[in-house]
Amino acid sequence: MTFRRGLKSAALGGVAALILVGCGSGGAVTVVDDPKLESEFDTVLTTGQQRSLGEITEAGGLDSDSWDRMYYFSAPLLMSEINRSLGTEGVVWEGLPGDEAKGILVFTSGGDVVTAVIDHKPAVLLSGYATADSMVGPDQAIADYERVAVESRGH
């Protein structure tokens, strides 16, 4: 993974966020709420229609050209687990959700964190990582549990 130093500001769904550009040994990523992006995942449940992850992020205000992978981490979360999985040793993840959330969605580009978004509802099922062309659909595996399944592209 290549890391660059520095932070940049970005806006997601009307929410300003401080987002890490590169995260070698140190730095911080601020996890944000993004109701607009979250509502696009909810639309998959309410309509029952599959959509690509790229369509969902574009409609949610996150340009699909700005990221190449999405990872999902279920709550409760440990910074060490996230850093180990992403290879972002020493990064401090600010604003990690507690029990009120299902987890976080982390979007990366070339190994750099682009943004991290809290997942409240619906829950997301993803093993490994997804790309813009991964399909997202309602997960029917557990009755009466609202969850969308995202097609994995690797680990």
Image (cartoon, grey):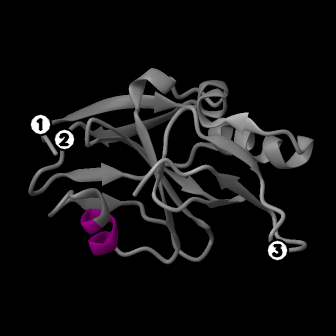
Residue 146: x %, y % from top left: 81, 63
Say what secondary structure mark 1 lies in.
loop
Region in magenta: 79-84
Label drawn at residue 4: 1
In reply to whether residue 81 is colored magenta, the answer given is yes
Q: Is residue 103 left or right of residue 86?
A: right
Circle 1: residue type: Arg
Query: What residue is at 52 percent from the left and 62 percent from the top?
Result: 127
Circle 2: residue type: Gly
Q: Residue furthest front?
A: 154
In reply to whether residue 140 is colored magenta, the answer given is no
Label drawn at residue 142: 3
Q: Is residue 145 above or below residue 126?
A: below
Dot 1 and dot 2 residues touching (CB under 8 Å) = yes
Sequence-first disc among 3 and 2: 2
Q: Is residue 131 left or right of residue 110?
A: right
**Marks 1 and 2, how far apart in space?**
4 Å
Circle 3: residue type: Ile
Residue 58: x %, y % from top left: 60, 25
- The front one of 116 and 151 is 151
Residue 110: x %, y % from top left: 26, 35
Q: Is residue 49 left or right of residue 99?
A: right
* Mark 2 Cα shell of 10 Å, populated few (<14), some (14-19), many (≥20): many
Label drawn at residue 22: 2
- The front one of 49 and 73 is 49
Residue 77: x %, y % from top left: 43, 74
Sequence-first disc among 1 and 2: 1
Rendered image quadrant of residue 139: bottom right
